[in-house]
Amino acid sequence: MKFHLSNIPGQHIFIAHGEGYVQVNEQRYEQPIIVMADKVISDWPAHSFATLTEASFSYFLTFKPEVVLLGTGEKHLFAHPQLYRALSNAGIGVEFMSTPAACRTYNILTGEDRKVVAGILFE
């Protein structure tokens, strides 16, 4: 699915997604990534939803977001609260949603100039 959204120069947004990929600006990704308005990190050590650990979530603390959106693939899955307790204790919201929903929500929140981080996983 292609998105059409006005692009602020230098800001990373999702412009497309499909089975096994997302596209951020002009770059296509087929591996787990972290997306923020000012950068994309493609070496996030999370490989799949099933392998998420407390460290996978603590990784987000250094970015000091208001909210973390976790795209869990085509299916909407929830992690055990113990895994993201460090984020909750820091006052950072954590939302789980399908990857397409995470892409859309990220674009909206980024457009509102919110400090949002999207972690995108694939099945």
Image: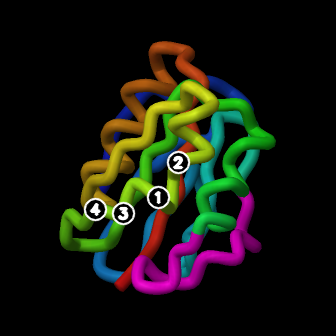
- Which labelled disc corresponds to residue 42? none
Q: Name the amino acid, label 4.
A: Phe
Residue where numbered disc 2 is placed: 85
Q: In the picture, residue 39 is in which quadrant?
A: top right
| Quadrant housing the C terminus | bottom left
Kindly state the secondary structure of the residue where label 4 is placed. Answer: loop
Whether the residues at callouts 2 and 1 have beta carbons within 8 Å, the answer is yes
Residue where numbered disc 4 is placed: 78
Q: Name the amino acid, label 3.
A: His
| Residue 73 place in picture, x, y as percent | 32, 72
Q: Magenta stretch mostly in which secondary structure?
A: loop
Whether the residues at callouts 3 and 4 have beta carbons within 8 Å, the answer is yes
Looking at the rendering, the stretch of residues picked out in magenta corresponds to: 41-53
* Residue at the farthest top position: 112
Kindly state the secondary structure of the residue where label 3 is placed. Answer: loop
Residue occupying image coordinates x 28% and y 62%: 78
Residue where numbered disc 3 is placed: 80
Mark 1 nearby-residue class (10 Å; few <14, some 14–19, many ≥20): few
Coloration mode: rainbow
